[in-house]
């Protein structure tokens, strides 16, 4: 199951697909990294070379906005994940500019975490409950507390993957 299958509002799915297609079409990415004129959000998250190019060019605020509106995180949590102040995050919104590559990478990493959570739990409420519950395998820390850095995100995704395969360590 893909994140797109779990977003209940078909309009949101279409907007994410449209945003990804627009972002890729208007980028300076070599066409060999994407062959279709339209690319879906799920296809984008599976194409690591395309992700690298988008990160280097910067994710537009409009993409971040769609992700953040459909994620179980507050604006303060997003600012923490992106390692910027809430005021800086609000400036990105006002100027509608692209995020720097460091923040772009974190936005896409968080998109992957959200997809992994939705793939396992099937809905955002169950995923949010799991994120907010201390996890023994993760040192009895709430998974949401580990999402601020790459190693923590990797641990969270690893745990989601193990649980999806029925491995409870």
Image (cartoon, rainbow, N blue to C red):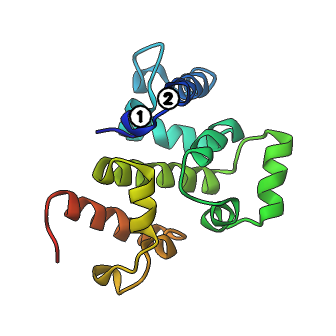
Residue 117, image x and y in percent? 37, 55
- Give me the disc on residue 13: 2
Numbered circles on residues, count: 2
Q: Residues within 10 Å of mark 1 (few under 14, many from 20)?
A: many
Residue drawn at x 16%, y 72% as measured from the top left: 168
* In contact (CB < 8 Å): disc 1 and disc 2: yes
**Is 92 on the left or on the right of 111, as rendered?**
right
Q: Nearer the viewer, residue 62 or 51?
A: 62
Q: Residue furthest left?
A: 166
Q: Is residue 59 visible?
A: no
Quadrant into which the C terminus falls: bottom left
Residue 39, image x and y in percent? 45, 22
Label whose residue precedes the other's in the sequence (1 or 2): 1
Q: What residue did someone put label 1 on? A: 4
Q: Residues within 10 Å of mark 2 (few under 14, many from 20)?
A: some
* Inter-mark Cα distance, 1 to 2: 6 Å
Residue 106, image x and y in percent? 55, 56
The part of the image, by quadrant, that contains residue 26 is: top right
Residue drawn at x 42%, y 23% as measured from the top left: 34
Q: Secondary structure at mark 2?
A: helix
Residue drawn at x 55%, y 25% as measured from the top left: 11
**Is 147 on the left or on the right of 23, as rendered?**
left
Q: Nearer the viewer, residue 90 or 121?
A: 121
């Amino acid at each position: 199951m893909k994140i797109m299958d779990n977003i209940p509002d078909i309009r949101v799915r279409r907007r994410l697909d449209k945003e990804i297609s627009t972002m890729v079409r208007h980028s300076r990415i070599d066409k060999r990294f994407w062959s279709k004129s339209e690319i879906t959000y799920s296809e984008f998250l599976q194409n690591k070379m395309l992700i690298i190019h988008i990160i280097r060019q910067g994710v537009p605020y409009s993409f971040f906005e769609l992700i953040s509106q459909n994620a179980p995180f507050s604006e303060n949590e997003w600012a923490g994940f992106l390692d910027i102040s809430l005021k800086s995050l609000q400036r990105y919104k006002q100027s509608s500019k692209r995020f720097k590559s460091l923040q772009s990478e974190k936005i896409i990493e968080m998109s992957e975490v959200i997809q992994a959570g939705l793939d396992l739990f099937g809905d955002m409420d169950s995923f949010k409950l799991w994120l907010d519950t201390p996890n023994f395998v993760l040192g009895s820390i709430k998974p949401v507390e580990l999402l601020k850095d790459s190693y923590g995100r990797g641990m969270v995704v690893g745990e989601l993957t193990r649980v999806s395969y029925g491995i409870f360590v």
